[in-house]
Amino acid sequence: MAAGARADGLASTDSCTRPHTPLEVTSVMYADYKRLHRLWDEFERAVNLCLVDRLHCQFSDFSLGLRRHIDIEETVLLSMLELQMGWRRDETGAAARSEHRSMEAALHQFDQLRLMNDCASILRIFDQPIDLMTLFERHYRDEAFLCIVMDRVFSRSEVKKLLVVIQEFEI
């Protein structure tokens, strides 16, 4: 059976598996999610081994990357979807933007790490009530709607334009 086909012969309703669908933007965002997750894992390893210089570097890379990811979602993806669909900004992406603010608040707590050089103080940061990676992973699961909407809304040429903007995007 071909990819995206169902046993009853109808096309799959899962737009992320249909081979003719422009998945590039979703793929880029998923690759960035995986990259951020890998940076976080490396950061946690450095914390567990008390490699202070290394954990500072890893967290800095993660923090900048997550802020960039959030900015791309808000400035590029959500904005373009809202414009294309005629959606109101305050209604459409309110939940995503709220989750972004929560992740930024958690990042701010972790930003204290840059000033710390002893493992005991660094480990106390992890005792904060906000679990940054739980927020990030939950948000990414909730973000799946972008795949379906983008596959139905944007043409291939529009996807190519979005990719150019994403690739050149900096915070």
Image (cartoon, rainbow, N blue to C red):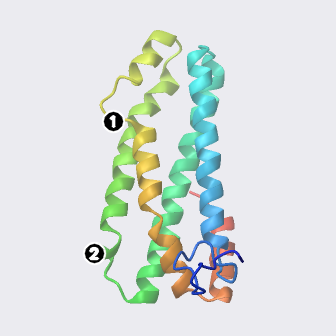
52 relative to 81 in the view: left or right: right
Give the CA distance from mark 1 to mark 2.
26 Å
Label 1 vs 2, first from the N-terminus: 2
Report the residue marked by disc 1: 130
Q: Which residue is at a point 53% across and 75% down the rendered structure image?
A: 14
Please determine whether, in this image, residue 139 is positioned above or below residue 16: above
Q: Quadrant of residue 125?
A: top left
Camera-side residue: 101 or 49? 49
Count of numbered marks: 2
**Residue type highlighted by circle 2:** Glu
Q: Residue at x 49, y 71 (%)?
A: 146
Query: What type is the residue that disc 1 sits on?
Result: Ile
Please rate how many residues cluster around mark 1, counting C-alpha atoms within 10 Å: few if below 14, some from 14 to 19, many from 20.
Answer: some
Q: Secondary structure at mark 1?
A: loop
The quarter in which the C terminus is drawn is bottom right
Measured as percent of width and height from the top left, residue 82 is found at 41, 81
Vertical placement of residue 91 versus 97, above or below: below
* Image quadrant occupied by the N terminus: bottom right
The residue that label 2 is drawn on is 91
The reply, left or right, for residue 149 in relation to residue 1 is: left
Determine which quarter of the picture holds residue 121: top left
Circles 1 and 2: CB atoms closer than 8 Å? no
89, 138: nearer the viewer: 138
Position of residue 48 measured from the top left corner of the image (x, y, whole percent): 57, 17
Instruction: Judge from the rendering whether residue 113 lies leftward or rightward of residue 64; answer left or right.
Output: left
